Image (cartoon, rainbow, N blue to C red):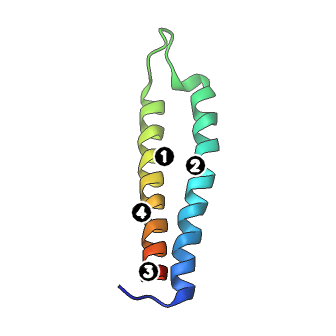
Amino acid sequence: MELPTPLSLILILAGVWTLIVWPPFLRRILKDPRARDGNGAATRFLTVHLMLISTSMILGAATAVIGVRTLVA
C-alpha cells in the first residue's frame, strides 16, 4: 500500500501517542479504590477500563505499524 509521507507520519504519530498516553492512565486506574472490592477481587470498573485500555493500545500499535510499513514501502 502506498500513502503520501505526511499521512504515514500522522499514522505513526497517532500510534505512538496512544502508546504513551494509556499506560499512565492504567496505573491510575489500578490505584483507584473502585478497581477492587472489599475482598480484593476486580470490579466491573476495573474490567471495563482494562478492556478499553488494551483495545486502544492494540489499535495504537497497529496504527503505528501501518504507518511504518507505508512509510518504508
Mark carried by residue 70: 3
Residue that mark 4 sits on: 62
**What's the amino acid at mark 3?**
Thr
Labelled pair 2, 3 in contact (Cβ < 8 Å): no
Q: Residue at x 44, y 46 (%)?
A: 54
Which of disc 2 and disc 1 is earlier in sequence? 2
Q: Secondary structure at mark 2?
A: helix
13 or 31, which is in the foreground?
A: 13
Give the x, y percent position of residue 27.
62, 35
Q: Secondary structure at mark 3?
A: helix
Cα separation, mark 4 vs mark 1, equals 14 Å
Q: Quadrant of the C terminus?
A: bottom left
Which of disc 3 and disc 2 is earlier in sequence? 2
25 lies above or below 37? below
Mark carried by residue 53: 1
Q: Quadrant of the N terminus?
A: bottom left
Cα separation, mark 1 vs mark 2, equals 6 Å
Give the x, y percent position of residue 9.
57, 78
Q: Secondary structure at mark 1?
A: helix
Q: Is residue 41 left or right of 19 when viewed as pictured? A: left
